[in-house]
Image (cartoon, rainbow, N blue to C red):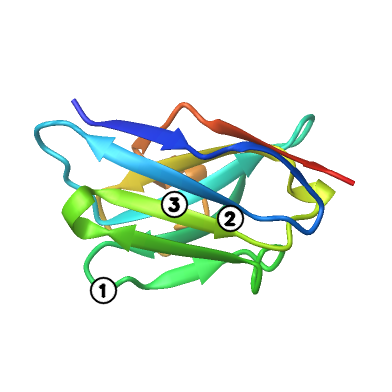
Amino acid sequence: QVQLVESGGGLVQAGGSLRLSCAASGRTFNSYAMGWFRRAPGKEREFVTHITWAVGSTYYADSVKGRFTISRDNAKNTVYLQMNNLKPEDTAVYYCASRKSWSSTFYQPSVYDTWGQGTQVTVSS
């Protein structure tokens, strides 16, 4: 059984940085791409970014473009989310997720089959 474990969340002041990690474990990890989503209090889960394992193709939500960077370490089955110039509106629980195939709707949570437990990111003003 594959498990995704996020780490790196915390409390940071506006303008600061955090780096989230998502490590996949399990005997058989079959994944085409990894995504990061977030859920702010009282809001729906929203897409942040994704990356494909093979070629490292990425896509970012407009709200984080230019501030967040996703990367991956194939040897470690780990993806990272570097978050710079954080804003209070970035406060949310951040989740990583894995999907097994290409999808034109990669921004939808429903196309991901494995999820981490989430890590809290709080940005103070």
Q: Is residue 82 above or below residue 3?
A: below
Determine the CA span between mark 3 and mark 1: 15 Å
- Residue 4 x %, y %: 34, 34
Left or right: 27, with 89 as reference point: left
Is there a contact, CB below 8 Å, between mark 2 and mark 3? yes
The residue located at (37%, 73%) in the rendering is 57
| Dot 1 crowding, Cα within 10 Å, few <14, some 14–19, many 20+ | few
Is there a contact, CB below 8 Å, between mark 3 and mark 1? no
Q: Helix or strand or loop: what does disc 1 sit on? A: loop
Q: Give the residue type at disc 3.
A: Gly
Q: Which residue is farthest right?
A: 125
Q: Helix or strand or loop: what does disc 3 sit on? A: strand
Q: Give the residue type at disc 1.
A: Val
Q: Which residue is mark 1?
A: 55
Q: Which residue is mark 3?
A: 35
Q: Which residue is mark 2?
A: 48
Q: Which residue is farthest left?
A: 27
The residue located at (74%, 49%) in the rendering is 90
Q: Give the residue type at disc 2.
A: Val
Count the numbered circles shown.
3
Q: Is residue 45 visible?
A: no
Q: Is residue 66 above or below residue 118?
A: below
The residue located at (40%, 46%) in the rendering is 111
